[in-house]
Amino acid sequence: MSCADHLKLPCYTLLLIILFSLPDGLFGQDFSGIPASLVIADGTPVKLRLNQTVSSSHARVGDRLDFLVTTDVTIQGFTVIPTGSIASATVIGVKGRRLLGIGGNVVLKLDSIELVTGDRIGLRARKQVKGRSHSRLMAAGIIAVGVFFWPAAPAFLLCRGGDSTVLKGTEVTAHIDGDAQVQTANLSRARDNVSQLSDVMSFVPPRVLNGEGREGDMVNLLFVAQAGDLQEAFQRGGWIKVDKWKPVTIWHLLRHRTHDAKLPMVRFYLFGRAQDYAYALPDPTAVVTRRHHLRIWKTDYAVDGSPVWAAAATHDVAIELGKHGHLIGHRIDPNVDAERDFIGENLTKTRFVNNQEYVHGVDPVFEAQTAAGEAYYSDSRILLLNLHQIMSSKAGSPGKVSASPGSITR
């Protein structure tokens, strides 16, 4: 060590002594701008998802339920309620399905939620779900039977409505009930610049549900796309947006028979909602019997400003009559991965795919059954496609499937 180096040491030491001898107000808490406590204001929204299915056929007043927080709640840069926290709820009203075609009724009330500190604060929100009414069907039956044999018509008054079912995964936005104070010393800083894709993979349900809450098809596709790009990509790929089920659908099916390319799909549910879009790519030689098809739901997440969509895809290969409790249904190819990859290849040809790769959810699905009881199998991977129209060849070639799972290229 040179003499010059020895002479510099006292200067650094003197500087440290001066800094630590300055008043606390300059370098203390006031300078940092971090308050000692924060107020979680009354009405702060909390996004939640129901952890189990509830039905008027078995629920009882006073039953306790859990909801899962799906998005961090942050206040002034601090996380006060992290994703994955549990909120408590109570069943406060139940009515079973009744005569005269009246459906059941279930009412849930959010009670409280746990903060990151371990304290609990109140929530306010209610969720009421009514079962399907069969009153019109009852009236139609009375009229139809009354024309031929009036004494039998009153029997239709014994018709009951449908059960009320609040499906697992149903989303609810609750609000903090009253101001609450929390000490910042017990809080962690909010996550900065974290893609919501990680939240999607953590909280997207692995399988869809039918109306009774039975698990069925697996979620095997994710799209990152604006709604217009999503619809345009499927249109260019030759896909048909199918009709929704209506009373006139039966007549339409009888009229067109095996040529009905827009044959509706059964409603399945994700996040407590029926599909937003349903697309089919029928086999020209057997339009109704064989078709590629998928159902698509918009999630509450976005990546780089583009919504994330979840989809469940299977390949119908034959018609089945009178099986699994349904008047008519399809048998699917049990290798659902083949349908997943077929859709990826089909959309790649439309020049809308910027990037695609395989990702994994937190709950892998290797073997399962459809809601109708058909077995299927998978390697558990989900195909993620980033869709945005490629205007020219200079923008690059369509995306290819990467060899290993990862996160979306931003």
Image (cartoon, rainbow, N blue to C red):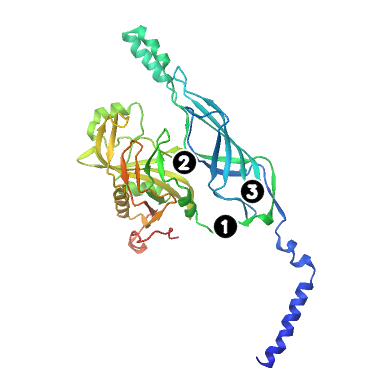
Q: How far across and how far down the image is residue 343, in percent?
A: 31, 50
Q: How far across and how far down the image is residue 205, in percent?
A: 44, 45
Tell me, yes or no, whether the two marked residues, 1 and 3, touch with CB atoms within 8 Å.
no
| Nearest to the observer: residue 370 or residue 159 | 370
Horizontal side of 171 relative to 74 (left or right) equals: left
Pointer 2 or 1: first along the chain: 1
Q: Is residue 224 above or below residue 87?
A: below
Name the image quarter holding residue 17.
Answer: bottom right
Horizontal side of 81 relative to 137 (left or right) equals: right
What SS does tag 1 mark? loop
Pointer 2 or 3: first along the chain: 3
Name the image quarter holding residue 185.
Answer: bottom right
Q: Amino acid at mark 1?
A: Arg
Q: Amino acid at mark 2?
A: Phe
| Nearest to the observer: residue 404 or residue 324 | 324
What SS does tag 3 mark? loop
Residue annotated with mark 1: 191
| Number of the label disc, if any, that sits on residue 118 | 3
Residue annotated with mark 2: 271
- Give the number of callouts: 3
Q: Amino acid at mark 3?
A: Gly
Q: How far across and how far down the image is residue 75, in percent?
A: 64, 51
